[in-house]
Image: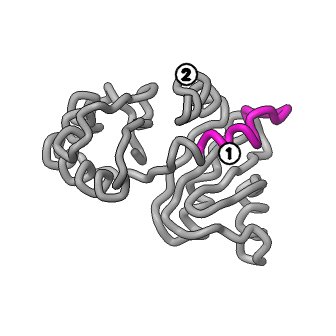
Amino acid sequence: MRNVNQRQRGHPSTADIVAGFADAGCPEVQTFQSNGTILFDSDEPAEVVASATEAIAARSGHERDILWISLADLVAVVDEHGETPDPRRHEITLHRAGTVDAETPDAISLMTRAGCSIVDAGPGWAVVRNDVDGQGNATPVLERLTGDRATSRGLLTLRRLVARFGSPSA
């Protein structure tokens, strides 16, 4: 989920998120940390996300975008980039556009101003390296490049998620 800090006033609660996914047909969800990262299993993830988005807003009064990536795709991205020597500078960002072209003049200009670079991208995701440890430039950069909402998680967070939940075939 985008822009969520569970347990904070003005954000959907964990109970609202879990119940919203149950309303959407996925009663067995796992929340990961308090940043709105949710794991669920469905043959129709886009439909579940659309239904859960509405259900969570109805339950909590707080509308949030939910963007998703399959666990298999996330594992592949983390496997590819997880051992970088500077993981605190990397974020994985989800968005609704296709694969972002980081070589366009607009993208290069925007990344230069923001102090980051897209180091890899695929359909609906990008790996962004920030110039400074702990900076979070990926979401605003991808939102400007795609013209739509995006959400990012730090590479260290996603390494922990993959280590905990493993590959989908495990």
User: Which residue is situated farthest in the front direction here?
Assistant: 169
In the displayed structure image, the side of residue 150 where residue 26 appears, left or right: left
Q: Split into 4 quadrants, where in the image is the C terminus? A: top right
In the displayed structure image, the side of residue 170 where residue 1 appears, left or right: left
Query: Residue under circle 1?
Result: 77
**Which amino acid, by three-letter code, is at mark 1?**
Val
**Which amino acid, by three-letter code, is at mark 2?**
Arg
User: Which residue is situated farthest in the right direction here?
Assistant: 85
Query: Residue under circle 2?
Result: 164
Instruction: Check disc 2: other Cα within 10 Å, few if <14, some if 14-19, many if 20+.
Output: few
Q: What's the residue at 77%, 40% (across, down)?
A: 132
Instruction: Check disc 1: other Cα within 10 Å, few if <14, some if 14-19, many if 20+.
Output: many
The x, y position of residue 133, in whole percent, is 75, 35
Q: Is residue 128 above or below residue 81?
A: below
What span is in magenta?
A: 74-89
Asked whether 134 falls inside the magenta stretch, the response is no
Q: What's the residue at 56%, 61% (across, down)?
A: 124
Contact (Cβ within 8 Å) of mark 2 with mark 1: no
Q: What's the residue at 45%, 25% (across, down)?
A: 33
Q: What's the residue at 59%, 43% (across, down)?
A: 74
The Cα–Cα distance between marks 2 and 1, rounded to whole angstroms, is 16 Å
User: Which residue is situated farthest in the top direction here?
Assistant: 164
> Closest to the observer: 4 or 94?
94
